[in-house]
Image (spheres, grey):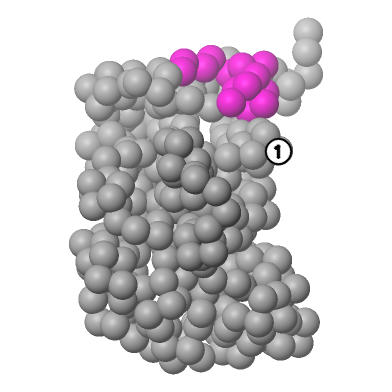
Amino acid sequence: MAPSTTCSVRLVSEKSRIVILRELLAAGREQLEERFEVESLGLDATRPEMLAAAKGADALVSDLTFSVDGELLDAAGPGLKVVANYGVGYDNVDLEASASRGVTVTNTPDALTNATAELALALAMAAARDLPQAEEDLRAGRWKGWDPRRWRGFELSGATIGVVGAGRIGARFMELVSGFGGDRLYTSRSPKSELESRHAAERVDLDELLSRSDLISLHLPGGAGTRHLIDEQALGLMKPTAVLVNTGRGTLIDSKALIHALEEDRLGAAGLDVFEGEPALDPGFLTAPRVALAPHIGSATYRSRDEMARIVAANVTAVLEGREPPNRV
Ligand code: GLV
């Protein structure tokens, strides 16, 4: 007969039921399937399907596309121990409702830091040089030969670069752009000595950053505290040639105000990976000039998305085995 410790671990594991409310890549899902009973609803799962499937779950795997609120937690019931969010941001999860039900919430930081910072740089360069418009014109047969007047944009070399929110992703972005050689500014609740010593970055308040920067990249979480941080007034502080990049959350920017600023030539360009109300986006973005758009692909590299899935599995496994998860929120 097996020793009793092994036996109790096996019994707990056998009973544990994990519901992946949408999709978890195989890199993480297969790890969970080795130990637990796993149900995966797929990308098209509806809210009623999620509520029904959650019943009796020990663990839920969620993502940024839907709310994990009291209703969903109650649908799972009192056996729910962990909500593992497949992403670094967790503004979709009601932390208070989770805490009051004794449910641990985890996320997947680090794995996507570099991928997201690289996408911010890609969007910055695409927007600054109006690449989407140039490509669209080429594909539509509007390229009639070399033209000194058309498709002109901004250079980032020597530009003053402002990073709003110098967490992991903002700091990596700062590192990536350090080769451009201009001044570097950042906002942060606390000073970042590494950014100041290695990249000669200067900590300033938001208004100063917005008014001095040629490129502004947003790296803040979503939620009520940061909603419409970039509004009409903030846009009014920016240089008319400034390039604004957002790979954080769509809610950071007042969409209408940004669209008007682009249409009225009050802003140089914008590179956006995230949108208010995504996947729907304000149609004004589709016709606004000098804008590079991406469908929320900040972490979408092979390496990052697989690693995030493995982190989800590690978080779920730790909680279900009674250990501290690597990434408790
Ligand atoms: C993506 O936006 C994430 O939060 O991981």
Residue 199 screen position, x and y as percent: 73, 82
State whether residue 248 appears in this view: no
Q: Which residues are magenta?
A: 25-40
Q: Which residue is mark 1?
A: 303
Where on the picture, by quarter, is residue 181?
bottom right
Residue 26 falls within the magenta-colored stretch: yes
Q: Is residue 49 above or below residue 288?
A: above
Q: Quadrant of the N terminus?
A: top right
Q: Residue at x 40, y 23 (%)?
A: 43
Between 84 and 318, the residue placed more toward the observer is 84
Q: Position of residue 130 (x, y in %)?
A: 48, 58
What is the x, y in percent for residue 153?
A: 51, 67
Residue 195 at x, y percent in the picture: 69, 81
297 or 160, nearer to the observer: 160
**In this figure, what is the number of numbered marks?**
1
> Is residue 197 shown above or below 90?
below
Q: Could you tell whether 6 is left or right of 259 in the image?
A: right
Residue at the image point whose x is 47% and y is 60% from the top: 150
Seen at 33% across and 28% down, the residue is 76
* Dot 1: element: helix
Quick one: label 1, few (<14), some, or many (20+) residues within 10 Å?
A: few
Residue 186, quarter of picture: bottom right
